[in-house]
Amino acid sequence: MTYPIRKAVLVASGDLRPAANQVCWPAQAAMEQALTRAFAAEGVELVRGHPFDPEAGHGFISSQRMGMDVFRDLDPDVPVVVAEAVWQYSHHVLPGLLHHRGPVLTVANWSGTWPGLVGLLNLNGSLTKSGRANATLWSEDFTDAFFERGLRGWLAHGRIAHDLRHVRDLDARALPDAARRIGDELAADLRRTKAILGVFDEGCMGMHNAIIDDALLNPMGVFKERLSQSALVAAMATVADDDARAVRRWLDERGMTFVTGPDEATDLTDAQVHAQAKMYVAAVRMAHAFGCDAIGIQYQQGLKDSVPASDLVEGLLNDGERPPVFDGAGRELYAGAPLPHFNEVDEGSAVDALVTNRVWRALGLDPATTLHDLRWGERYAAADADGAPIDAFVWALQISGAVPASHLDGGYAAAEGHRQPPMYFPLGGSTLSGVCKPGALVWSRVFVLDGRLHADVGRGTALRLPAAETARRRRATTPEWPILHFVAHGVDRDAMMARHQANHVQVAYAPDAATADAAFAAKAAAFAAMGIAVHVCGDVPHHAAPAAS
């Protein structure tokens, strides 16, 4: 490869769902035009590696085979720019990128309209797991100093050096004795009694980074039960209508509001919610039948063409307070406890949720946990809803509904069910939506690097922003979905983007900052005792002082 780079090829990975690619194409086209201008300003020609398809109505790579064919016809040494303004399926371009010899730059627009940042992070995590080096950038308009500096570095050297000083390796010896004792006991118990992750159709969303090989899980005492989503549909057919009605009645009695209408194609309907109630009962019964400690439903491929969305189900499962489900003998299953659900069968989140559940229970805390997408964010310099001043970068964390009601400000009484967007969810289904409550958080991510499990762990705060600001942020993203106003302690926007190896981040609440510090320490200790390489991110309790990397 000859530097500086004077010509690069742009490719765009898209969704498998034609409707999503068509609806989101204008945003992608606008981004590509801005990116082309930015390259031209540096004297570099940026050309598309595959054409716009007028029959399909978009210019995305929309399948793995198409991606292979695109890369087959490229010069194997040409610099490649993967430009993302939308959610994308990483396996569309991963095979081509793994065999490509030229330098690779992944780029996203800093916008909440479509989940381009989410797609970028998933692709970056998938490349990291695969051992394929890449540089990465993001920008609102591709004219800011941060982007221009990074682009010039990539054009000159094929790499970009981001500031990662917020990441330090954990020194487990610095953790409090109580935290290390909890961690050691939980890791030993897990190896002795073992745990099962119920995996419904692993990998069908193309999230390579979300698949953890058995060889990495099994030594910790974690095993997979590979389940079929078709079996879940079959199990739904065995759930009595009265059992489904009982689920809906339970939610109605607790004040959850379902915003329904008459049109199945565009509205949430009572029939969709009824089907989701059947899925909830069926999922709990299947998990119990296979002895699962946590389950993950893939949904977006396969189930999307068969039944309404799984997200309401996922949110209920992640909460200890939820509609009771009984077996044939009248015994309540998983009574009074969450059955952790890892959205989109993200197995990094599965391990994280399993550990969080056990650590929080050991500390006597509410073990409800969930994952969110790192969707988007902006600096907020004003007062919060209670009048306290804020000046921080505030993330808008979102996921398509899988948030437990105990994480919402007001619980079930403040929860709303909206129809899932038709372009992603053709058969509809309710979200479990609302604004997440303020409070102290522990955040984390388990990922694969160099053939080993790693975990980034940090502290954060959920804010209560004024209603007008919350409404603005929801309009800027997906208003049907739950939202969490999140500040990561000691980790700014660009540091988080440069380091994070997934589209998802795991969060769990604690009643106050001191308790969250203790939970952070115990969770880090548990990960370390399980053999996971732990990295502390940002500002953390002084008693968990890490060693320098």
Image (spheres, rainbow, N blue to C red):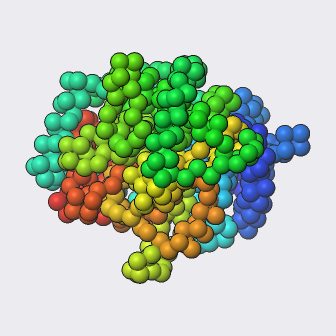
Q: Residue furthest right?
A: 54
Q: Residue at x 63, y 37 (%)?
A: 272
Q: Residue at x 29, y 56 (%)?
A: 510
Q: Is residue 316 visible?
A: yes
Q: Residue at x 39, y 80 (%)?
A: 388
The image position of residue 526, as x and y in percent, is 23, 41
Q: Is residue 196 left or right of residue 384?
A: left
Q: Is residue 533 left or right of residue 482?
A: left
Q: Is residue 294 left or right of residue 156?
A: left
Q: Residue at x 26, y 35 (%)?
A: 531
Against 46, residue 241 (above or below) is: above
The image position of residue 121, as x and y in percent, is 54, 49
The image position of residue 25, as x and y in percent, is 77, 51
In the image, 112 versus 103, the foreground residue is: 112
Q: Quadrant of residue 527?
A: top left
Against 424, residue 154 (above or below) is: below
Q: Is residue 152 visible?
A: no
Query: Count the marks: how many?
Result: 0
The image position of residue 220, as x and y in percent, is 28, 29
Q: Residue furthest left?
A: 177
Q: Quadrant of residue 110?
A: bottom right
Q: Is residue 301 left or right of residue 505?
A: right
In the image, 520 versus 158, the foreground residue is: 520
